Amino acid sequence: MVSDDAKGSPRPSPPDSRRAQGGLALHWKIVIGLVLGAALGTACHVYFRVPEAPGWEDARDADGNRVDDRLDWVAANVADPLGRIFLRLILMVVLPLVFSALALAVVELGDLRHLGRVGGWTLAFTVLLSLIAVVIGVTLVNTIRPGYRLAEEKREALSAQYSKGAEETIQKARQAKPLKDTLLDIIPENPLQEMVGALDGTSKGNGMLAVMFFALAFGLAMAAIGEKAAALTGVLQGLFDVAMAIIGFAMRLAPFGVACLIFAMTARLGGELLTTLAWFLGVTVAGFALQLFVVYPLFLLVVARRNPLEFFRGASDAMLMAFGTSSSNATLPTALRVAEEDLKLPPAVSRFVLTVGATGNQNGTGLYEGVVVLFLAQVFGVDLTVTQQVIVVLMAVLGGVGTAGVPGGSIPMIVIILQAIGVPGESIAIILGIDRILDMCRTVLNVTGDLALAASVARWEKPVTE
Ligand code: ASP
């Protein structure tokens, strides 16, 4: 693990969740958990649910009515609660994590103003790249509609399983507020009240979006008062570190948690869920591919005036590292090296942009957050209004800024956005089983985006005449 000093970042090293005790990398353990849970769940589903299968007779009473609730019982009372331990550990630190991560990110971005043009360009390109990424994701989900490719009764089963009172939640989500109120509610009257209600949707205003606004304002003010905020920055950094440590512990339970959650799902729903997830997987990967192979090359050609092929060749070390670690923070040292040695970027610009970008510019994460949220909304039959979709886009762009550059960093943010639009946060369990492989992919985008950003800022800050 590289020290913080070596990384040149005020951010801590990510908790070492890449390699759990026992030598086997965590992502392999998660894959194993996923496969075992899905296989066992599917086997149980076939054994207990298919009428011709042995065991089915046992599940009927004397009148031939179905009384097969044993599997449901095990899924609901054993597997599901065990899986939720892992989820709750993550949910528990959502609020401190979001507040500290976002405020600290803004303090870093706020400092940019002192660096004049470099800061301005970094901010502008970050917003542009993140917005393009999120819009690509949201457009794909709206066009292909992967969530609706699940049979009606399966969707209802999922809704019933993952929401106590889905009716009420869905109803609430449909009661869209007028645009002016939605926008005004972004500014909280009472941030603490918004925090209390942010996770269960009982806040008066915009819940987590209002909390994010508060964190943004807080970070900007901290940057404005400079040295006087040094102690507070230390406190927030401590809060962030503790939240990340807890997420690190939770991630160690991930293989077991994922196995339980996937078992509970497949046991009750059978293999069709995997077909739905295949559509989700396809849409997400298509979005990633568009951003990586269309948007970045165009951006490099037009804005950075660089040959995209040469750029990708130079950036490949960092891209592979990102894929292997699923962590922008862990990839930062490699990204800094390739920027200077292979891409020949001026160190002053690349060090600055890459360090800030590791946390602040996460295009893959933004895209993913948008896709997951809309997909789950579809699974739950929540038709989002244009205003709600704009909120999702906005929150996903902010999510890309506020998400920690560690494995699974975007999961808390997804829960927040889900709650904000009235979809139960627990429903994230539906995609957790395949999150890890998508985490590897989106981190590649995050890191490539940082390098493309650095190349562009370097070009505009100091035009190169080759
Ligand atoms: N793993 C991602 C990164 O480090 C963050 C995330 O989307 O979970 O860039």
Image (cartoon, helix red, strand yellow):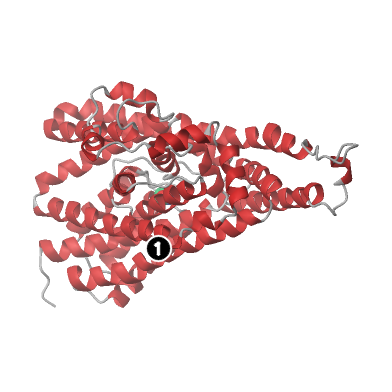
Using the image as rendered, state which of residue 431 and residue 344 is in the foreground: 431
Name the residue located 17 percent from the left edge and 35 percent from the top edge.
220
Residue 304 spot, x, y in % from top left: 19, 69
- 140 shown above or below 119: below
Name the residue located 43 percent from the left edge and 66 percent from the top edge.
286
Residue at the outermost front position? 63
How many dots with numbers?
A: 1
Residue 46 spot, x, y in % from top left: 77, 52
- 387 shown above or below 242: below
Residue at the outermost right position? 62
Q: Work out whether residue 149 can be spotted.
A: yes
Residue 172 spot, x, y in % from top left: 41, 34
Residue that label 1 marks: 287
Residue 126 left/right relative to 435? left
Q: Quadrant of residue 404?
A: top left
Using the image as rendered, state which of residue 23 and residue 458 is in the foreground: 458
Using the image as rendered, state which of residue 402 and residue 427 is in the foreground: 427
Residue 181 left/right relative to 374? left
Q: Quadrant of residue 256?
A: top right
Looking at the rendering, in which quadrant would you find the C terminus? bottom left
Q: Work out whether residue 23 can be spotted.
A: no
Using the image as rendered, state which of residue 314 and residue 432 is in the foreground: 432
Residue 271 spot, x, y in % from top left: 67, 55
Name the residue located 76 percent from the left edge and 40 percent from the top edge.
71
Query: What is the crowding at mark 1: few (fewer than 14 residues within 10 Å), some, or many (at least 20)?
Result: many
Q: Quadrant of residue 157?
A: top right
Is ligand 1 within 8 Å of the beta carbon of the residue shown at mark 1? no
| Callout 1: SS | helix
Residue type at numbered disc 1? Gly
